[in-house]
Amino acid sequence: MRILPFFAACALALAAPAGVHAEGQGLRLQQSLPGAPSAEPSELPVYVIADRIEGVASDELQASGDAELRKPNALLKADTIRFFRSTNEVEAAGNVRLQQGDDSVTGPRLRFRVDDSRGIFESASYEFAPRARAPTSDLRRSSQPIGGRGEAAALRLDGEDRYRVDHGTFTTCKPTESGWEISAEELDLDFGRGVGSARNMRLDFLGVETPAIPYASFPLNNDRKSGFLAPIFGIQGRVGPEILVPFYWNIAPNYDATFTGRLMEKRGFQVIAEGRYLERTYNGRANLQYLPNDWVLDRDRWLVSWQHAYIDPARGMSGAINYNRVSDDNYFRDLSGRLALATQIYLPQDAFLSYGSGFWDGGTYTVTGRVSQFQTLQDPQNPVPIPYDRLPQILVSSLKQNAFAGVDVGATGQFDRFEHPTLPTGNRTYVYPYLTYPLLTAGTFLVPKIGVNATYYSLDRVPAGIPTSQTRVLPIASVDAGAVFERDMSFAGRNVVHTLEPRAFYLYVPFKDQSQIPIFDTSRADFNYAQIFSENAYLGWDRIMNANQVTLALTSRLIVPETGQEALRGVIGQIFYFDDQRVPIAGIQPSTDNRSPYLVGLGGIVWPNVYAEAISVINSDNFRAQRLNAGVRYQPALNRVLNLGYRFTDASITPPTGIRQVDVSGQWPIYGNVYAVGRLNWDLNENKPVERLLGVEYNAGCWALRGVWQAFPNSAGQDTNVFFVQLELGGIANIGSNPFEILRRNIPGYTRFNQAADPLRQQFDYFD
C-alpha cells in the first residue's frame, strides 16, 4: 500500500533540504559523475513517490516498492530508488524505466544526475522519438526528423538529447517491423545536432551483414553533415554501368560543397565538384565536371556552370550571373541521364545588374545592364539556328503615379547590340513613353492608355538595298475595362461564392511597313490568356502588329469562402478585328479573319479527389479545336495518384502533321506494400512512344526499395535509357541512384513514402 503522507514530506524535503539555504530553489548540483560541469541550483523541485520511503531527514533517501521520481519533463520508475542530496544523484535498480519527454529507456540498473540528465544505464533497451525541427535559413533542405530504438550493454546519457551506446544496436524500424539495424562497439547519437556516429560498425539488412566499418557517421534528420554519402549505382546506355561516390563538406551553415568521383564502364573516371553559398544579399552555386581522356572519344571533356543571384533592397540593386559551357556538342547526350540536360540545345551565358530608385516626389525608375549569349549544341543530322548575342543590353523604365490630375506618367526604353557570326548585326534603340488614367472602384476598373513607340536601327552587314539606318514611330492606344460581380450560393452541398468577371480590352496601332527591318529577337506570340490582352501580337520589338481590335472575355469562379480555394473556374475569350492584320514575320502572313479563335478553359474539383482541367483554342468558323490540352488527376490518398492527359495541336499550328499525344502516369499500390510507378507518353501520329518510365517501389516502413527504368529521346532524336535502383534506410541513408526528381517530373502528384503530398495545384497550367 502506497504511503501517501510521505509524498508531501518528500516533496518538501527535496525542494528545500536541510543544510541548503536556497529559498525557492532546488539542490545545487555537485560534480560527481564524469564530465559533468557545475550548475546553478534548479528552481523546480523533484518529487519521490513510493510504497516505502526511508531517510527523509538524512543525506540519503531510499524509496522502494513501485518507486517513482518525478521532475519536469522526466519520470523515473524502479523497484528501488536511492537519492543522494549532496550530489543530486539517483541510483535505481530493478525494472528501471526512465521517461524523458517522448524518449524511453528501460534496464535493470541506472545511475543518474537529476539536474543535467547525465547518467549510465546498464543492459538498456531504448526508444527515442523524433525531434521537432526548428525553422532554418541556411542551405539545408526541409527534412524529416527521425527517431530510433535499440539495445545497449551500457547506455550513457550525456545531457539533453545526447546518448552514447556501448556495444549496442540502432534502427529506425518499429518493434513490429523487420529490416535493418546498425551494430557497433560505440555509437554516439546527438539529436540536438542531428548527427550519429559509429565505431566498428556493421549494417545488417534482412539478415545480410556488411563487413566491419571502422568509422561511419550519419544524419538523424536527413540534414547536412560532412562525410562520405551513400554510393550511387546506375546504368545508362552511353556510359554503361556506373558508380558515383560523393563526399559532402558542410563548411558552414551557409556554405557547402560536394565532391564526387564517377566511374563509368564505357567512359572512364570523371570528377565532379559542386559548391553552394548563401549570404544576406547574394547566393549561388558552381558546378565543375572533368572527364580526362574519354575512353570512347579519346579526349578530355568538361563542364563549367555558375549561377549567382544578388539583391540588396537597401541599395536598390539586384543582379545575376548564369554561365554554362561544355567542351563539346554531345556532352549532355553522352554523359547525362537527366532529360532536362540531355535535351538541352542552348546553354545561356548571361549576366545583369539592375539599379532602382525614386525621383520626382514618389516616382520610381530602374536601370538594367545586361550581356547575353549562348553556346549552341549542334547535331549534324538536325542543325538548329544560332541565336543572336546581346552585347550589351541596357533597359530603362520609370513610372510616376498621379503625376497630375490623376494621370500616371511612365516610360520604357531599351538599347541592344546584336552580334551574330553570319547574319546581319546592328544596334536597336527604342523608347516608349505613355500616359494612363486609371479609374478604379472596389468592383470595377477602367484604364485608358496612350503612348508612342519610337525605334531606331543602326545596322551592319545587311543585304544590298536594305538601309543601314532605319526609324519607326508608332502610336499605341488602349482601353482596359472590367468588373467583378459576386453572389453567395450553394454548390454540391457547400456554400460557395460565385463570381462573374467580364473584361474588355480595346487596342489601336496604325499600320507601318516594317519589311526591311531585320529580325533579331522577335517571334509570334502564343495565343493564350495573357496574350489576348497584350499590346503586340509579337514577342520582341522588331515587329509591331497593326491593330484595331477589341478583346472580350468572361471568367467565372466558384470559391470556398473559408479557405479561398477555387472549386471551379471557367474562362472564355475572343478578339474581334476591325482591320486586317498586315505585318508578317519570316514570310508567314497573319490571318485576315475578322475574329480570332475562341480561347476556352475549364478546371476544378469535379468529384471528390478528382481534379480536371482543359484549355482549348477553337476555330470560330467550324468550332473545331486547333489546340487542346486536357488532364484529369485522381488522388484519393498519399502515394496513390492516377493521371490522364491529352495534347493536340492542328497541323496548321504545328506543321506538317500536328501533335496528338496521350499521357498516362501514376503511383499506385499493386500488392500489399508494393507500389507501381510509371508513365507513358504516346505519339498517336507516329504510333510510337515519346517517353517511357516504369518502376516498382516497396515500402517496408523503416526502409524502402525502388527500381525505375526511363527512356526518352535526347536532342539528337536518339533514345537514352537510364536505370535507377535505390535503397532507403529510414532517413539514415539512401544507397543507390536517386530517382525522385525523375518521378516528380513525370508523375504529377507523386509523393515519397512517409511524406506529405504537395497541395493540388488549383490553376490552369496551360494558359497561366
Image (cartoon, rainbow, N blue to C red):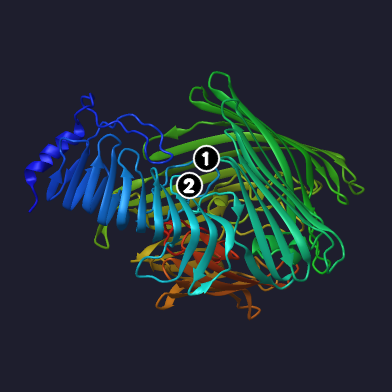
- Give, as a three-letter code, the residue at label 1: Val
> Where 244 falls versus 155 (above or below)?
below
Mark identifier at residue 504: 2
Residue 493 placed where, x, y %?
24, 61
Residue 9 placed where, x, y %?
11, 37
What residue sits 65% from the left and 57% below the top? 246
Q: CA distance from mark 2 to mark 1?
A: 8 Å
* Direction from residue 537 to residue 345 in the image, left or right: right
Residue 313 placed where, x, y %?
57, 29
* Direction from residue 174 to residue 580 in the image, left or right: right
Mark positioned earlier in the residue sequence (2 or 1): 1
Whether residues under marks 2 and 1 lie with C-beta atoms below 8 angstroms apart, the answer is yes
Residue 626, image quadrant = bottom right
Quarter of the figure that contains the N terminus: bottom left
Mark 2 Cα shell of 10 Å, populated few (<14), some (14-19), many (≥20): some
Of 223 and 627, nearer the camera is: 223
Residue 755, image quadrant = bottom left
Of 112 and 116, nearer the camera is: 112
Of 663 and 128, nearer the camera is: 128
> Where 331 falls versus 9 (above or below)?
below
Q: Secondary structure at mark 1?
A: strand
